[in-house]
Image (cartoon, rainbow, N blue to C red):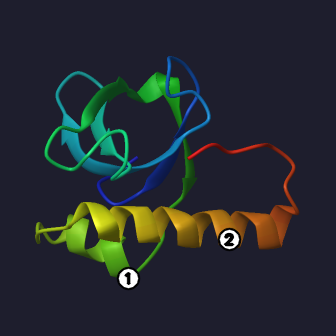
Amino acid sequence: METGDVVISRTGRDKGRLMFVVSEAPENDIFAADGRLRRIENPKRKRKKHVERVLSPRGGVSEKLRNGRNVTNAELRRGITDVKCEIQNTESGKEEIHG
């Protein structure tokens, strides 16, 4: 799991929510944000074992995060919407994803 990946929370109040990994933290933790409940200014610290990588998108928000450029909450929300559409097109909604 690296910065820019899209993950889904498997535990906690945010269970089932898609988020972008905005940075890595020490001790197998990540900081994740979705631009709505967890904004880029205050990302959620999560243990890697409590999230599952959905995909590693290329370009757009992911590329900006990997390069250390500023990302807005609107860009995070738009990126998550794009990922949801991609998931629905490929898996035809096997699992309900909140967000």
Q: Amino acid at mark 2?
A: Cys
Instruction: Name the residue beneath numbered marker 1.
Output: 59
Whichever of callouts 2 and 1 sits on the residue coming sooner in the sequence is: 1
Secondary structure category for the residue under label 1: loop
**Nearer to me, 49 or 76:** 76
Q: Are marks 2 and 1 in contact (CB under 8 Å)?
A: no
Q: Is residue 14 left or right of residue 3?
A: right
Residue pictured at 13% horizontal, 46% vertical: 41
Q: Amino acid at mark 1?
A: Gly
Residue pictured at 48% horizontal, 23% vertical: 49
Residue pictured at 43% horizontal, 78% vertical: 58
| Label 2: how many Cα within 10 Å (few below 14, some 14–19, many 20+) | few
At which x and y percent is residue 54? 59, 52
The CA distance from mark 2 to mark 1 is 16 Å
Instruction: Name the residue beneath numbered marker 2.
Output: 85
Q: Is residue 11 left or right of residue 37?
A: right
| Label 1: how many Cα within 10 Å (few below 14, some 14–19, many 20+) | few
- In the rendered image, the residue lying farthest to the bottom is 59
At which x and y percent is residue 46? 35, 26
